[in-house]
Amino acid sequence: MLENPKNSHISTHTVVFAKNVIQTLEDMTGVSFVLKEDSFQESSFSSSFNMIAHIHFVGTIEGDYLLSLNEVLAAKLIDAYEDGMSEQNLREIRADYGDFIKEVLNTAVG
């Protein structure tokens, strides 16, 4: 699994956060994920996924913890997705999988 490539404070916390998200998802769903080394980048945030959960923090530094994923995956994680589900049906259960993702984020941040 990915270690801290730059040995910086922010990099260390980013790696710890990513590992915590993976562990939290496995603990809550039994689904395992792998942190890919090429997913760790110091750049402006952008995402090809349409679901983004975030928690703002303030302290010695200020920033946000972000979790971005596909809504279909989020629905699948709570066993709410059915093959062929329409976007309308997915929107109708958005609060359910959205609450779950928020809880994953809260738990991972600790």
Image (spheres, helix red, strand yellow):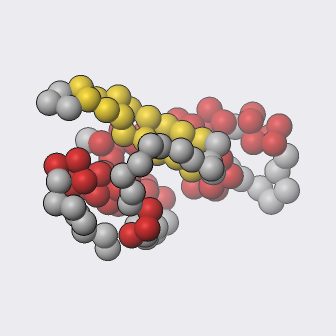
Q: Residue 37's spot in the image, x, y percent?
A: 39, 70
Residue 29 in sight in this render: yes
Q: Height in image: 86 above or below 39?
A: above
Residue at 30% x, 42% y is 109
The correct choice, above or below, for 15 with respect to 96 in the image is: below
On the picture, is 100 further left or further right than 50?
A: left
| Residue 33 vertical position relative to residue 46 in the rendered view, above or below | below
Q: Residue at x 16, y 60 (%)?
A: 7
Q: Can residue 20 be seen in this view?
A: no
Which residue shows up at 29% across the image and 51% down it? 14
Residue displayed at 82% across by 50% down = 85
**Quadrant in which residue 65 is drawn:** top left
Residue at far bottom of view? 1
Quadrant of the snapshot with the N terminus: bottom left
Q: Where is residue 35 in the image (x, y as percent from the top left)?
A: 40, 67
Q: Residue 21: name its quadrant.
A: bottom left
